[in-house]
Image (tube, grey):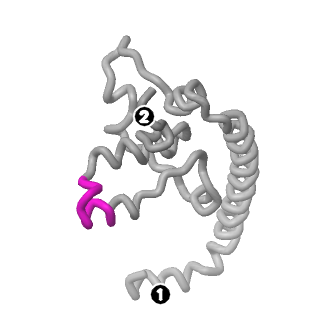
Amino acid sequence: MNTNPGRGPFHFKSPARMVWRTIRGMCHHKTARGQEALARLATFDGIPHPYDKKKRQVIPAALRVMRLKPGRDHTVLGELADSVGWKHHDLLKRLEEKRKVKAEAFYQKKKARTQLREKAEKAAAGELAKVNEVLAAAGY
């Protein structure tokens, strides 16, 4: 072989880096504007700390059922990365399980707090009727 594989092209094994590389191919990464855009892009394997507490959002137009015809082949990026040598698939599964358990406990606590608050508001509704009328007249 007359080429040195250490000089590239580099084939990333992590799903996050695969997505980063794909998006890099979609933008003008050799211009200053493209480099700034790429610098703002952050891709992660799993859900890291500041984002695990944020509310998830679904983009309906990006769902597989909306984009692909029934019967078409598709792949999951994590499985593809695992097949080409990414070694952290099992670790990410374990971390995701732990995150889901914590999220479920948080949600149950939040639901209980909400029920207590609603119960307290109903109990205090008679006492606060006059205050609510004043607030409604003021536009609140």
Q: Residue under circle 2?
A: 3
**Between disc 2 and disc 1, whose residue precedes?**
2
Q: Is the residue marked by circle 2 packed among few (<14), some (14-19), or many (20+) residues within 10 Å? A: few
Instruction: Using the image, determine if residue 117 lies above or below residue 77.
Output: below
Which residue is outermost to the top? 71
Q: Quadrant of the C terminus?
A: bottom left
Amino acid type indicated by mark 2: Thr
Out of 106 and 3, give the one closest to the viewer: 3
For disc 1, the neighbor class at 10 Å (few under 14, some 14 to 19, many from 20) is few
Q: Position of residue 3 (x, y in %)?
A: 42, 34
Which residue does the image show at 42% across and 21% down from the upper left?
A: 74
Residue at 37% from the left image edge and 42% from the top image edge: 22
Q: Does residue 73 lie above or below 83 as drawn?
A: above
Label 1 is placed on what type of residue? Answer: Val
Q: Nearer the viewer, residue 27 or 71?
A: 27
* Magenta-highlighted residues: 28-36
In this rendering, the label closer to the viewer, 2 or 1: 2
Residue 87 is one of the magenta-drawn residues: no
Mark 2 residue element: loop
In percent of width and height, residue 55 lies at 53, 55
| Quarter of the image where one finds residue 124 | bottom right
Q: Is residue 34 magenta?
A: yes
CB-based contact (under 8 Å), mark 2 and mark 1: no
State the separation of the CA atoms marked 2 and 1: 81 Å
* Residue most extreme to the front: 2
Q: Position of residue 70 (x, y in %)?
A: 35, 15
* Residue at (68, 66) in percent of width and height: 117
Q: Is residue 12 rendered to the left or right of residue 82?
A: left
On residue 134, which mark appears? 1
